[in-house]
Image (cartoon, rainbow, N blue to C red):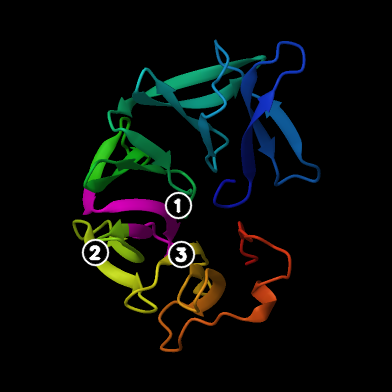
Amino acid sequence: MASDRSYGARLALSGEAGCWYPERWTLDGPEPYAVPLPAAQPEEPDSELLPLADGQVLIHRQVAGHHAFSLLYPTGPGTGERPLGGIDRAEVSLLPPPPGGLCAFALGRGPRSTSVWLLFGGGVLAPQHLVEVPGRCTGGGWLDRTGRLLALDRELDGRTKTVVVDLRRGGEISPLLQITERSDDRLLLADPDSGLLLVRSDAPGEERLGWGVLGSTRPVRFPDCLRPAGWAEATPFAVQP
């Protein structure tokens, strides 16, 4: 989903040829409709897509161990493609779209640290390395409307805690979630407008969903209503504004 919910994107499977191709969904009109964006060759099913707020779709492909990025856009009956370069890391994943929806970021994981990359936006036309964070980072959530404060779940010394990376202060790192000293605490969703945080933690004795408010002095709460009977694991994916 684009950050302003104007577009969605997915990989669709062609019924005739049995090939995967990108598909963009227009969601801000009176009726959603799909725009196919097939490239010159079929896509692998593990390719990642990120729709931008201007209608372009960024695609992340793995090609012979190399992570390549391109922008796809409709051009009449066909699909235009603009290569953006690549990243040589063992593992790379796209971050959620930042506020504004006209930039794209990725995480590159190495053996001892995780790098944050700006893939597109702000005049950048090729992947630009921004910061290096010690430890293995996953997830990702934006805590403000300027695209400055990025929350990451960092595994370090056997524990996972959510930290905040300030992208405008040289990657300065500060803690966000440390519910107990021995718990694994992960951020699932953050709403910059209300400050609502949805988390997953084993602090209550088992993994539970909880909620808190950014900047509040009150502890994270783990209500029973976020623990439906018979659910092995609930994964929230959107916050209502």
Question: Above or below — where is 71 with respect to 237?
Answer: above
Residue 187's tag is 3
Between circles 3 and 1, the one closer to the viewer is 3
Residue on which the image places disc 1? 98
Q: Give how far apart the Cα atoms at labels 3 and 2 are.
A: 16 Å
**Is residue 169 at all visible to an observer of this figure?**
yes
Characterize the local packing of mark 3: few (<14), some (14-19) or many (20 or more) Cα atoms within 10 angstroms: many
- For the magenta stretch, what is the residue range? 131-154
Please state which amino acid type lies under the numbered disc 1.
Answer: Pro
Mark 3 or 2, which is nearer the eye?
A: 3
| Residue found 44% across the figure and 77% down from its top | 214
Above or below: residue 157 compared with residue 227: above
Residue 148 visible in this rendered orientation of the protein: no
Helix, strand or loop under label 2 = strand
How far separated are the C-alphas under marks 3 and 1? 16 Å
- Please state the horizontal and vertical placement of residue 202, each as a whole percent of the image: 47, 71
The residue sitting at 65% across, 65% down in the picture is 240
Q: Position of residue 116 (x, y in %)?
A: 30, 46
